[in-house]
């Protein structure tokens, strides 16, 4: 994804592109700017520029609720919609690098779409569940494991409580 030429070659001749790749690393990742944020943003921009060049009709970008839900100044009780973004400064302050990478990538994607006329839509799943492609539990699957072990509980639909154990 970081090699524009590879992206352009893969996308040439496509009518629709699903952009689903993004690094998902632990929050305590060394050098998050280089290992998480730059690949997410640069990879997304390479895909979008290659799509423009190839005259792709639509790009479906898989983002995340991470790009939406971390905004301490969002009014309580107000539904989160297209106007809600995770607070970039807050994500940096709390070192929530994955949320920051998804927010920055999506913001830049929509900015590029507006300037270029490329048709870009996003979906923002909360968890991605399916067969694991690696021998270890990934970030989404770890949420399920934590529920099963009793480390996470739900008080009601919108509140997850982390156990002190």
Image (cartoon, rainbow, N blue to C red):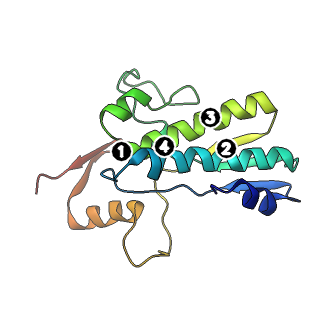
Residue beneath the point at 85% across and 46% down:
53
Q: Is residue 121 left or right of residue 128?
A: right
Is mark 4 in CB contact (under 8 Å) with mark 1?
Answer: no
Q: CA distance from mark 3 to mark 2?
A: 8 Å
Dividing the image into 4 quarters, which one contains the N terminus? bottom right
> Disc 3 vs disc 1: Cβ atoms closer than 8 Å?
no
Contact flag, marks 3 and 2 (Cβ < 8 Å): yes
Please provide percent x and percent y for residue 143.
Answer: 34, 60
Which disc number belongs to residue 57? none
Res 73 quadrant in image:
top left
Q: Earlier in the sequence, mark 4 or mark 1?
A: 4
Tag on residue 101?
4
What distance separates the C-alpha of mark 4 from that of mark 1? 26 Å
Closer mark to the observer between disc 4 and disc 1: 4
Query: Is 73 or 54 nearer to us in this picture?
Result: 54
Q: CA distance from mark 2 to mark 4?
A: 13 Å
Disc nearer the start of the sequence (1/2): 2
Kindly state the secondary structure of the residue where label 4 is placed: helix
Point out the frontmost of discs 1 and 2.
Answer: 2
One can see residue 124 in this view = no
Whichever of callouts 3 and 1 sits on the residue coming sooner in the sequence is 3
Between discs 3 and 2, the one toward the N terminus: 2
Assess disc 3: are there few (<14), some (14-19) or many (≥20) residues with their C-alpha within 10 Å of its C-alpha: some
Give the residue number, with chain letter if any, for mark 1. Answer: 157
Image spot of residue 164 (x, y percent): 11, 52
- Mark 1 → mark 2, Cα distance in angstroms: 35 Å
Q: Pointer 2: what residue?
A: 45
Q: Nearer the viewer, residue 34 or 24?
A: 34
Q: Which residue is mark 3?
A: 108
> Marks 3 and 4: CB-CB under 8 Å?
no
């Amino acid at each position: 994804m970081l090699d524009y030429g590879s992206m352009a070659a893969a996308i040439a001749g496509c009518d629709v592109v699903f952009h689903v790749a993004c690094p998902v690393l632990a929050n305590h990742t060394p050098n998050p700017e280089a290992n998480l944020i730059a690949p997410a943003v640069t990879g997304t921009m390479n895909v979008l520029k290659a799509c423009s060049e190839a005259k792709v009709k639509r790009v479906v970008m898989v983002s995340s609720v991470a790009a939406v839900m971390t905004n301490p100044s969002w009014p309580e009780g107000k539904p989160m919609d297209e106007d809600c973004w995770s607070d970039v400064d807050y994500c940096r302050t709390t070192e929530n690098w994955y949320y920051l990478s998804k927010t920055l990538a999506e913001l830049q994607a929509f900015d590029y779409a507006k300037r270029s006329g490329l048709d870009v839509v996003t979906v923002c799943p909360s968890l991605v569940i399916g067969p694991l492609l690696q021998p270890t539990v990934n970030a989404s699957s770890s949420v399920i494991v934590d529920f099963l072990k009793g480390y996470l509980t739900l008080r009601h639909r919108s509140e997850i409580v982390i156990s002190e154990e």
